[in-house]
Amino acid sequence: MLVSKNAKVWTALVTVYIIWGSTYLGIFYAGQTIPPLFAASTRFITSGTLMTLFVLLVRRGSLRARRREVLSAMLIGILLPGANSVLFFAERNVPTGLASLIIASVPLWVMVLRLGVGRERLPWQVLAGVGIGFAGVAVLAQPSGGAKVYGIALCVLSAVMWATGSFLSSRLPMPADPFAATAIEMLTGGFAMLPFGLFTLHHFSPSTTSIIGWIYLVIFGSIIGYTAYVWLLANAPLGLVSTYAYVNPIVAITLGVIFRGESLTWRLLIGAAIVVVAVATVVRREPAEATVPEDGVR
């Protein structure tokens, strides 16, 4: 029996919801006994290699592009995988749910860059959403419940790096094939971090849980999740696809409660509600720019 396109769309959407929402838990487990920089660098080198094989063997494509396009993809590769590696450090000092909510502020930071760097005129609803969203981040950014100032600051840094990479990716010349662009980004980010990862590799003895978390990030987070996302961009309304931006934190919080025993405080719930509503407002008003970053490196 043929599966309807609507069913395929929702299958892919739920895949993105669950997989990208669960990568925060995967990062936590992978980083428990594997040095963060080594875990992040090897993850992206492996993911980039698999994505390259997918481009060459499955899509019958090529990584060839103009020099400017390759250089742009390499720059984005430093920012986005770099942001992810920062998150490996952050989640050692911040609960999974809180980290996901701070990262959910990426669309808000993108708006700040569009306003300040791009000199764009944005609708008042977007500006109001940005202001409210950062108020929610301020509510969340309080060291309590196991969260440390150091970890919270790293989460904010990760969000800013991710937003900067997303902002630049829509303004720089990039390879036409998004899969090829992502392969270049992953490989660049992975190899850029590898020397530092090897330098921190002392008494390497990863647990089974960390290895499983690392494999999950490579196969599900980077390959399956991104493939589903790119398919959605070509087959579903952008407003529907962009809902991942505020569904992922809900998934991450739920998994944090179930698997890490994280507590749901009133401050977390209030901050989460403010951030999710603000991001939803920004996403719905400005989906083309704010909600379609290069997310293949999650």
Image: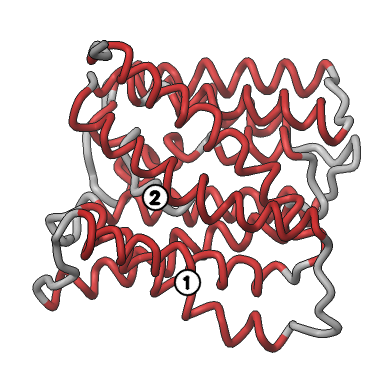
Residue at the spot 30% in from the left edge and 66% down from the top edge: 52
Q: Earlier in the sequence, mark 1 or mark 2?
A: 1
Position of residue 81 relative to residue 128, above or below, is below
Q: Indicate the quadrant where residue 169 lies.
A: bottom left
Above or below 158: residue 132: above
Residue sitting nearer the eye, 234 or 58: 58
User: Among all residues in the image, which is located at the extreme front?
Assistant: 1
**Type of residue at label 2?**
Gly
User: Foreground mark, 1 or 2?
Assistant: 1
Give amino acid for label 1.
Ile
Q: Position of residue 99 (x, y in %)?
A: 68, 41
**Left or right relative to 258: residue 84:** left
Vertical order, 4 against 89 (above or below): above
Task: Name the image quarter holding the N terminus.
Answer: top left
Q: Which residue extends farthest left?
A: 66
**Residue at the disc numbered 1:** 45
Q: Is 169 situated above or below 244?
A: below
Point out residue 51 in the picture as x, y percentages from the top left corner.
Answer: 35, 60
| Residue under numbered circle 2 | 296
Q: Which mark is residue 160?
A: none
Numbered disc 2: secondary structure: loop
Q: What element carries label 1?
A: helix
Residue shown at the point (86%, 30%) measured from the top left: 262
User: Left or right of 91: which side holds 161?
Assistant: left
Are the two marked residues, 1 and 2, in contact with CB atoms closer than 8 angstroms?
no
Residue nearest the observer in this picture, 117 or 227: 227
